[in-house]
């Protein structure tokens, strides 16, 4: 596919953690990119200066129409949304608004504008607590929190819209995303983040006193929860390949897990951070959290069959090293990027 065939891609939430990596990956692959982000959890510094940036909400249909026309948008990568599971339980209506209702507004605007394809950032939370720890895309979707439901509802809207209007859709269900751009261009900057590797890196560098370990009596090798951790750069590489697949073979829709098929426990992660720093993170054992499965690991067979996806960073120590590098970088550049350590 040559540069002349690559219409512009609108990245919603492109100033956030995963979205900003997608912007870089698209640019590296020669795709023209534009970003819309309301900066509620994203950071303006995370978007390269040369990328057209629109500050606003994806529910603003007039703004979206303006972007579609001005930028000649041929695809949407939709990352904008809220992602903290406990917050979704405490304030479900906010999640159904931000993740579901606003996605409906975005999808509607895309259909009206004749945008032919959309790639959606979904989650393994749609599976809830599955019967088996390794899940395929055919595993029943039974979310146990509003976050998972809000994403599954959007998946259903996309399936119905695809059938009715011919929108080509790719749904990517993420497992545990971690790490940072290997070149140090962007990373997880959100203050108060809940992702384990981010939390562990903050603790290792003195930003937290300890790491809470929720549950040490699971039926796993060391008693702690096991998850499939995927490097954010490998994840966004899958998005670019999915986009190319939709362009090259129009008229189809895809739903795929994004994980490596390898699980690591909470203690495995903390040990990896200790190895990288030569220190020792204090572990504080806590009771299990309601609804946490003992283990949740992707079966990546479908994505490996559908796309020429060759992960470059499928190694826990590499993921941790890149996450630590970014954590050190934002600690050193607060004067340059005053929002980097701000509240999100």
Image (cartoon, rainbow, N blue to C red):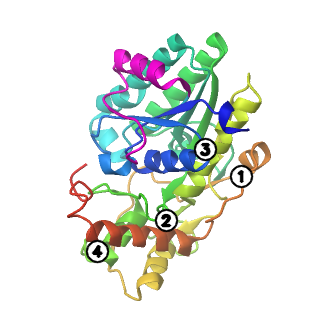
Q: Position of residue 302 (x, y in %)?
A: 74, 45
202 or 65, which lies in front?
65
Q: Which mark is residue 309?
A: 1
Please identify, in this view, whether the residue under mark 1 or under mark 4 is nearer the observer.
Answer: 1
Question: Mark 4 against mark 2, which lies toward the viewer?
Answer: 2
Q: For the residues labelled 3 and 2, say whether their Cβ atoms are less than 8 Å apart.
A: no
The correct choice, above or below, for 283 with respect to 2 in the image is below
Among the two numbered marks 1 and 4 on one chain, the one whose residue lies closer to the N terminus: 4
Region rendered in magenta: 48-74
The image position of residue 61, as x and y in percent, is: 37, 16
As drawn, the residue found furthest toward the bottom would be 278
How far apart in space, not on screen, are marks 3 and 1 (Cα)? Answer: 18 Å
How far, Cα to Cα, is label 4 from label 2?
Answer: 29 Å
Does label 3 or label 1 sit earlier along the sequence?
3
Q: Is residue 263 magenta?
A: no
Residue 260: x %, y % from top left:
65, 59
Q: Are marks 1 and 4 in contact (CB under 8 Å)?
A: no
Marking on residue 327: none
Q: Who is closer to the viewer here, 239 or 131?
A: 239
- Report whether residue 276 is seen: yes
Q: Is residue 57 above or below residue 335?
A: above
Asked if labels 4 and 3 touch by Cβ distance under 8 angstroms, the answer is: no
Secondary element under disc 4, as helix, strand or loop, is: loop
């Amino acid at each position: 596919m040559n540069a002349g065939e690559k219409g512009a891609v609108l990245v919603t939430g492109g100033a956030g953690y995963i979205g900003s990596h997608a912007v870089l990956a698209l640019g590296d692959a020669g795709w023209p990119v534009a970003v819309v982000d309301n900066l509620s959890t994203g950071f303006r510094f995370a978007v390269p200066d040369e990328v057209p940036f629109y500050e606003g909400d994806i529910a603003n249909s007039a703004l979206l129409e303006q972007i579609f026309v001005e930028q000649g948008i041929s695809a949407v990568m939709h990352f904008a949304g809220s992602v903290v599971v406990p917050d979704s339980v405490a304030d479900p209506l906010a999640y159904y608004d931000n993740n579901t209702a606003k996605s409906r507004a975005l999808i509607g605007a895309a259909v009206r504008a004749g945008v032919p394809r959309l790639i959606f950032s979904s989650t393994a939370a749609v599976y809830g607590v599955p019967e088996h720890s390794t899940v395929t895309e055919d595993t029943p979707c039974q979310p146990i929190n509003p976050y998972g439901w809000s994403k599954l509802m959007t998946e259903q809207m996309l399936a119905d819209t695809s059938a009715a209007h011919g929108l080509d859709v790719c749904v990517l269900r993420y497992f545990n995303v971690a790490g940072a751009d290997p070149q140090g261009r962007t990373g997880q900057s959100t203050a108060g983040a809940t992702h384990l590797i981010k939390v562990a890196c903050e603790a290792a560098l003195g930003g937290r006193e300890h790491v809470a370990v929720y549950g040490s009596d699971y039926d796993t090798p060391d008693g702690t929860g096991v998850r499939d951790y995927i490097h954010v750069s490998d994840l966004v590489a899958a998005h670019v390949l999915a986009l190319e697949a939709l362009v090259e073979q129009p008229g189809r829709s895809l739903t795929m897990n994004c994980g490596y098929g390898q699980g690591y426990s909470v203690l495995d992660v903390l040990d990896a951070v200790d190895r990288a720093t030569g220190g020792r993170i204090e572990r504080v054992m806590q009771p299990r959290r309601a609804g946490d499965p003992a283990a949740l690991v992707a079966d990546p067979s479908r994505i490996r069959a559908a796309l020429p996806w060759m992960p470059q960073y499928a190694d826990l120590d590499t993921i941790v090293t890149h996450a630590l590098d970014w954590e050190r970088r934002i600690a050193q550049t607060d004067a340059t990027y005053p929002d980097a350590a701000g509240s999100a």
